[in-house]
Amino acid sequence: MARARPPKSRRRRAAGPRVGPSPHAPRPTPAERGLLALARELGALGRDARGAADPLRAALERLAAAYAPGAALVGDLHRAWLSSRGDKTAALALAWAREQLRLALEDLVARPPRAARGRVDAPPDALAWLLLAACEAIAWEPPSAAADRTRTLLELAGR
């Protein structure tokens, strides 16, 4: 049996121009903004060698302070990580912001000659990853141990 044709009022119309709000990228979380601000600070340290005698030392001290127990960035990162667990876009955005920070640190690690890089004989990208991971771990240390951990990182980096 053939189907009857729907009345004209019920026929589908061709899609026209979309009316309503246009799609936009989600706003960065406070954690992403904090990571990107840190990356900009580290990049500025590398560009302005006159401002700090040793840009890598200044960068590690800045990172250790940013990841100190109770620092605002630590709480922001924890909240962003928890909220991104089921959201691939949010997880990717957070990972991208962290990677920008690691790349800024890598630029500072790669500046001195290999012989002057410290105790770890590793490529700059691996050493930057290691130093960043160690700074992130400071957040979970007792507050009284943060200064000792920072000193250890500076020694590891040959500073």
Image: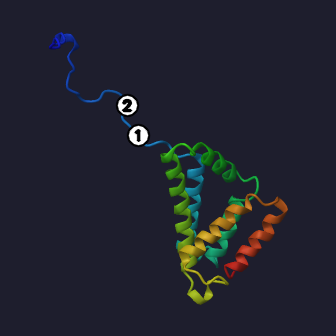
Residue 157, how many percent across, how many down? 67, 79
Residue 132, how many percent across, how many down? 63, 66
Crowd rating for badge 2 (residues with CA inside 10 Å; few <14, some 14–19, many 20+)? few
Q: Which residue is more in the foreground, 79 or 87?
A: 87
Q: Does dot 2 land on a helix, a strand or a loop?
A: loop
Query: Residue 60: which quarter of the image?
Result: bottom right
> Where's the C terminus, which quadrant?
bottom right
User: Quick check: 124 left or right of 118?
Assistant: left
Q: Residue furthest front?
A: 1
Q: Is residue 85 visible?
A: yes
> Where's the N terminus, which quadrant?
top left
**What colouring style does the render use?**
rainbow
Q: Is residue 3 above or below residue 70?
A: above
Taking the spot 52% from the left edge, 43% from the top edge, the residue there is 87
Amino acid found under the numbered disc labelled 2: Pro
Query: Where is mark 2, residue-wise?
Result: 21
Residue 68, how many percent across, how many down? 74, 59
Q: Residue furthest right?
A: 144
Taking the spot 52% from the left edge, 46% from the top edge, the residue there is 90
Q: Which residue is more in the foreground, 62 or 5?
A: 5
How far is disc 1 from disc 2 in space, using C-alphas? Answer: 9 Å
Q: Does dot 1 land on a helix, a strand or a loop?
A: loop
Query: Where is mark 1, residue-wise?
Result: 24
Q: Are marks 1 and 2 in contact (CB under 8 Å)?
A: yes
How many circles with numbers are drawn on the protein? 2
Amino acid found under the numbered disc labelled 1: His
Q: Is residue 84 above or below residue 23?
A: below
